[in-house]
Amino acid sequence: MKTIYLDNAATTQVRKEVLSVMKPYFSEIYGNPSEPHSMGRKAWIRMEKAREEIADFLHSKPDEIVFTSSATESINLFLKGLIESIKVQEKSTRPHIITSSVEHKAVINTCLYLSNKKLAEVSFLPVNRDGQISLLDIERAITKETVIISIMYVNNEVGTIQPIDKVGRLVKKVNKKRSVPIYFHTDATQAIGHLDCNVNRLGVDSLSFSGHKIYAPKGIGALYVRSNTPLVKQLYGGFQENGLRAGTENVAYIIGLAKAIGMITKTSGSDTNKISKLKKRLIKNVSKVVGVKLLGNPKTSAPHIISFLVKGVEGESLVLYLSERGIYASSGSACSSSTLEPSHVLTAMGIIREDVHGSIRFSLGRNNSDKDIDYLSCVFPEVVEDLRNMAPKK
Ligand code: PLP
């Protein structure tokens, strides 16, 4: 059976170039980078080269990059670490975070933790039907206690691109009149590899991302934090990562991450072009099926993420049936199986509860081809029809 992998927003296949640069650091140059002997020094030198390469890509400085295990860890480090630093300075007020209601759970649940522990007040801003935040809403939500604005760059369920550069300019303007600045963070996990991540152009103080969405392995992530941003470490132990993240660095994966980033620079133009064309083809073909509606606005969404609502079927069943035909996609409804909780993203976009469960996400990657889309276009209507025929008649 063919395998058509259309779940690249969930994770990607590790590139062979990435695997090959990592390999020696498992079995030959496996020294601890904190050790002064020559094998440790070799590992350290190569790790610092990787840091420089990643910093160059983001237009930042090497000492502004902290290696972590994932985007989730990067996000936790920034949000909790900054709030903790503010608490230390000013005990009388509760710091305020502004974020959106469509963030990944990594942001939403960290904010809820901070709010439940009474460490911060959090405003979750609404979005429009395309999943976009409003700059005016952000401006209006700012109070004198606001210390963090955290807005995702690209939404993982529908692909909506948020106007990060415009928020960056707004924060800069507002900060001119404040003694305690607002720090602006973006979760760029779904943007990196597809959109410009120059931190200066975006005007962000911090940016999180993960290796496994860009053809590096799972288990490596990074946090960019602009110099002089106050941050309290969240892991106690050694002084690795400038004292911000204790624990022996994952040297091989860090080198793999830098290689994956390097490959983006090399191929981003052609990959993005190809993926954008595939996206158009997929939308054209899949939208033809009766009762199927595209979610979000394709003009303001990332090239690789496409979500649909499919009337009269459960997204989870659709994923399982497509998988039996060799097509791997993801159910946008992302019901946490025990609670059957509908997607907070689609709910925030105003999709009614009944429809939310019929959503499906296809996410494209560099390995996909026209043939994959054509196979999907053939199989998808059949599977939808089968599932509709099986559904109990109302
Ligand atoms: N943020 C976004 C937008 C994501 O899509 C994901 C993963 O799907 C994450 C954060 C979490 O990434 P990780 O799995 O590296 O923790």
Image (tube, rainbow, N blue to C red):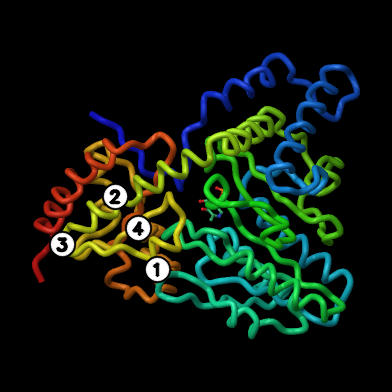
Q: Which residue is mark 2?
A: 282
- Answer with left or right where residue 107 lies relative to residue 247: left
Q: Could you give the CA–CA distance between mark 4 and mark 2, rounded to whole angstroms?
A: 11 Å
Labels 4 & 2 near each other (Cβ < 8 A) = no
In the rendered structure, which amino acid carries the disc numbered 2? Leu
In the rendered structure, which amino acid carries the disc numbered 3? Val
Q: Nearer the viewer, mark 4 or mark 2?
A: 2
Q: Which residue is mark 4?
A: 307
Q: Nearer the viewer, mark 3 or mark 2?
A: 2
Q: Position of residue 144 (x, y in %)?
A: 77, 83
Labels 1 & 3 near each other (Cβ < 8 A) = no
Q: Residue sitting at 83 percent across and 70 percent down?
A: 86
| SS at badge 1 | helix
Q: Residue sitting at 67 percent across and 27 percent down?
A: 252
Earlier along the polypeptide chain: callout 4 or callout 3?
A: 3
Mark 4 neighbour class, 10 Å CA radius: few under 14, some 14 to 19, many 20 or more: many
Q: Quadrant of the C terminus?
A: bottom left
Q: Could you give the CA–CA distance between mark 3 and mark 2, rounded to whole angstroms?
A: 15 Å
Please tell me the numbered disc located at residue 392.
none
Q: Position of residue 75 (x, y in %)?
A: 66, 56
CB of residue at label 4: within 8 Å of ligand 1? no
Q: Which residue is mark 3?
A: 290
Q: Residue sitting at 62 percent across and 78 percent down?
A: 138
Q: Could you give the CA–CA distance between mark 4 and mark 3, rounded to whole angstroms?
A: 15 Å
- The front one of 271 and 107 is 271
Q: Could you give the CA–CA distance between mark 1 and mark 4, rounded to whole angstroms?
A: 10 Å
Q: Which residue is mark 1?
A: 346
CB of residue at label 1: within 8 Å of ligand 1? no
Residue 338 seen in this snapshot: no
